[in-house]
Image: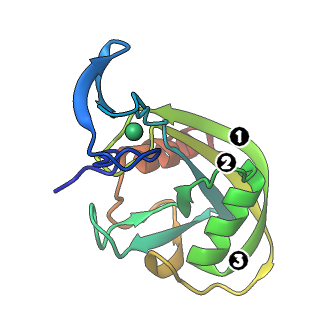
Amino acid sequence: MKKPDEISFCVQCGTPVRQEEKFGKIRPVCPSCGWVYFSDPKVAVAVVILEDDRVLLVRRVNPPHKGEWTLPAGFMDSGESIPEAAQRECREETGLEIKITELLDVFSGREHEHGSDILLIYRGEITGGVLKSGDDADQAEFFSMNSLPPLAFAATRITLQNIIKENR
Ligand SMILES: [Zn+2]
């Protein structure tokens, strides 16, 4: 199976690319026009929404960790601001409108093959909408911090543990 960053053809001239060492790393290179493919880091944003001592989580419909729970989150589109990306992901996965209020944490490094290189965790507050799961989540629910469901990612677990520890 192809990795998301793998490409087969030059985007400039359509020639099949070759894997060659360029700028210290093996990269797809076009033997015809010399175009080099640089994969950009992927940026994702996740939102912690608390109501009293309960946190909003969504259940994943996609692997990895299908059926486990995580924070509303997703990749940023190029050209999108952080608030726009956070608001869009919350709307798609939970039906809720939010504003982001505070940067809680930043994680770097891919946790899995299809994950982000940079993950920004924000605190959000609900400003409208009706709770309803959608997109790549089949359930969206508030959980007491004392009885969390199986969590999908280390970044989710660490974020929630820090919130419990700091009681914020
Ligand atoms: Zn080319």
Left or right of 80, for residue 27: left
Rendered image: mark on residue 55: none
Quick check: 75 above or below 108?
below
SS class of the residue under badge 3?
strand
Q: Which mark is residue 103?
A: 1
Q: Earlier in the sequence, mark 2 or mark 1?
A: 1
SS at badge 1: strand
| Nearer-the-camera pick, 4 or 139 | 4
Give the side of residue 126 with respect to residue 46, left or right: right
Pointer 2 and pointer 1: residues touching (CB < 8 Å)? yes
What is the three-letter code of the residue carrying label 1? Leu
Taking the spot 53% from the left edge, 59% from the top edge, the residue there is 74
Report which residue position mark 2 lands on: 122
Ligand 1 shows up in the quarter that is top left
Rendered image: mark on residue 96:
3
What residue lies at 54% left-to-right and 59% top-to-bottom? 73
Residue 128 position, x and y percent, is 81, 79
Could you give the CA–CA distance between mark 2 and mark 1, rounded to whole angstroms? Answer: 5 Å
Q: Residue 100 at what x, y percent from top left?
A: 77, 54
